[in-house]
Image (cartoon, rainbow, N blue to C red):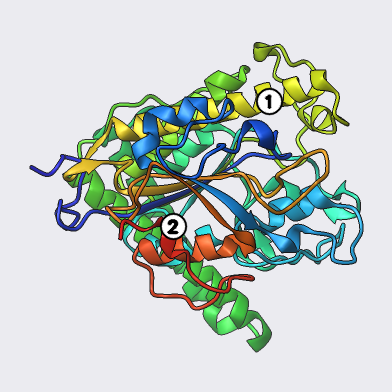
Amino acid sequence: MVPALTLAKNTAANPTARLGFVYVPNGIIMERWTPISEGAGFAFSPIMQALEPFSDRLLVLSGLAQVNGRALGDGAGDHARAGATWLTGVHPKKTEGANIQAGISADQIAARELGKTTQLGSLEIGLESPTLAGDCDSGYSCAYTNTISWRSPTTPNPMEVDPRAVFERLFGDGDSTDPASRLASLNEQRSILDYVAADVNRLKGELAASDRSKLTEYLEAIRDIERRIQKAEEQNATMQLPVMERPSSIPEEFDDHARLMMDLIVIAYQTDMTRVVSCMIAREGSNRSYRSIGVADGHHSVTHHQNDPEKIEKTAKINHLHTQTFAYLLEKMRSIPDGDGTLLDHSMILYGSSISDGNAHTHDNLPLVLAGGGCGQIKGNRHIRFAKETPMNNLLLTMLSKAGLHPLSKLGDSNGFLEDISEV
């Protein structure tokens, strides 16, 4: 039997692949993160303890690097470069102005293909409000620290931190996922688009040649919205959506905010609204405090511990809280039936950072975990150590390939695939 929320074509024999990228900033206390043993049946480290229940669907990956996060002659700014390189592998341009430049991120490459059959190509979620425009890290624009998702080398995708806004993007501005409420919202959107299309037609004969390219981009955006509405109408007629009320605001406590946003990620996958999600647990360079676990100091501040045991302990507590948040997401995905398995069985969710040691701002031997079965293509319960300086983009390239995308020969600084993560 195929679950009610699964489209007919996504049967047990042909499950839908989903991709997720969950980022944590400022590095991790690596001696409390990295398992001592390698291979199968490794012992989970203290920071990773919350992930042990998912060991059969988990790979710990050591040794991978984002070398373009290093200065390479640009001086300070490791946090900005970390955020910009994690999913791109491209050294960002050092600038405080509008002339930002990085690279297309792996999530957006996936979204271009996997988004052809979903309402949303991708979903970008954050758990901390972005900082203001301008300089956020030693001459680097805040654009580099506020997101890990880049639609193009010059177009960063903003991370949405308001659960109400995420809900409305998924289901419209109705008060719940109720079909009647969604249909009314869709009809209103369609009427607005009809008006806009008529207005554009009147403009066609009046524009100079120099403005026609802008009009073309505008029309493509309208057509994408029309496609999403059509897809929404189809889903509204055939799917019984899980009941969820529209959130009212951003919860004050980190745990409440995080769990609500994780719930929204799961329902986005479950309803096939999107198959690609990127999420920042906090923006890169974040100095938020976590009083609920007894850490009143700023996160970034304590990562510069200078071997102070008290600061190391506080950083480790924050690291552990973040892995608990990730574990909550994995548990929710494991609980949702999907074809002949679960959402987790049919997903690849990457968790980690583009900085390993936050005290020294190192960009090699990154803390990375790949969770999910990858539709039977990932063999879990292993700690794999790769050769030093192996590009992390080799992992991203491999994930895209296993998600069924047309084979790519290059992504950022990649130089091959990671065959070791496969079932065979």
Kind of residue indicated by mark 1: Ala
> Which quadrant of the figure has residue 209?
bottom right
* For residue 190, above or below residue 67: above
Mark 1 element type: helix
Q: Nearer the viewer, residue 59 or 270?
A: 59
Q: Is residue 327 visible?
A: yes
Q: CA distance from mark 2 to mark 1?
A: 35 Å
Residue at 61% in and 17% down: 253
> Which quadrant of the figure has residue 98?
bottom right
Mark 1 neighbour density, 10 Å: few (under 14) some (14–19) many (20 or more) = many
* For residue 421, above or below residue 46: below
* For residue 94, above or below residue 317: below
Location of the N terminus by quadrant is top left
Residue 160 is labelled as none
Rendering coords of residue 138 (x, y %): 91, 50
> Which quadrant of the figure has residue 269?
top left
Residue 121 is labelled as 2
Query: Which residue lies most toward the bottom here?
Result: 209
Query: Which residue lies most toward the front here?
Result: 37
Kind of residue indicated by mark 2: Gly
Mark 2 element type: loop
Q: Nearer the viewer, mark 2 or mark 1?
A: 1
Q: Earlier in the sequence, mark 2 or mark 1?
A: 2
Residue at 60% in and 82% down: 212
> What residue does disc 1 label?
316
